[in-house]
Amino acid sequence: MRQSTTKHLYAYWNEVRGERLAPKRFDIEPAQIASILPETFILERSNDGEFRFRLAGTRICESFGREFRGARLLDLWQSNDQAKLDELLLGSLQNGAVGVIYFHAETEKQVSIECEMLLLPLLHTGDRIDRLLGSLATLEKPFWLGATPLVRLQSKEISVIWPDGRPCGQPRSEVRRALAKTEPTYTRIVTSAHRSFKVYDGGRAKDGSG
């Protein structure tokens, strides 16, 4: 995790989650994350199977020059990214995975900035994950951001965090004791080319680079 908004939201979500796979939607108190609300959003999987925005913060809307309510998340991404992101989203809903996406966002004139997106599972009704809490924040604040809309996103690195450590086969109690509240522990790169795909256990990054 590179951006302070990402770290802040992950830490809050993880604290609220406690011993559960994911917190409930109504456990999230906006007042507790007021400073980053403009860069947060909520997704739901609609009846057509698409992941759509229910809410999006003002800074996100301003950066793209549009309103996001009801819009498909995958429409923001280039076609070669969409299948990977759809798999990540389904993994969050089905298994409680946390996703972190490092990407470049471009304007129509191909001016780009570095950004980071966080995807966190939420329970909405019963014990089923059917919402995602997220953040979208830039790693820089150029003077033109908000005046010149971002229009294209291209992923550079997709990371998966398993806060309860299940992919590592460790007993849940051991992972819970080792779990820190802010940073994941780097495990390995699964695929590598121009883009990379990483998997993380729960825990704190040793070198702080996250």
Image: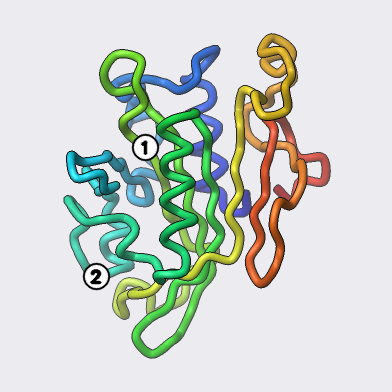
Q: Residue 65 carries which label?
A: 2
Say which label, 2 or 1, has the lower sequence index. Answer: 2
Measured as percent of width and height from the top left, residue 22 is found at 45, 23
Kindly identify the amino acid type of the residue bearing the numbered disc 2.
Answer: Gly
Instruction: Tell whether 192 sits left or right of 107.
Output: right
Residue 82 in the image: x percent, y percent?
Answer: 41, 61
Q: Which of 63 and 130 is in front in this view?
A: 130
Q: Which amino acid type corresponds to the residue marked 1 in the rendered image?
A: Leu
The quarter of the displayed image where residue 114 is located: bottom right
The foreground one among 119 and 89 is 89
Q: Is residue 96 above or below residue 75?
A: above
Q: Find residue 71 and report its horizontal and vertical position in percent.
A: 21, 56
Residue 132 is labelled as: 1
Q: Is residue 15 above or below residue 149?
A: above
Viewer-nearest of discs 2 and 1: 1
Name the residue at 69% across, 33% down. 201
In the rendered image, the residue lying farthest to the bottom is 109
Is 85 situated left or right of 126 in this image? right
- Residue drawn at x 62%, y 27% is 181
Q: Position of residue 1 (x, y in %)?
A: 62, 49
Q: What colouring style does the render use?
A: rainbow
Residue at 31% from the left image edge and 30% from the top image edge: 130
Are the residues at dot 2 and dot 1 in contact (C-beta closer than 8 Å)?
A: no
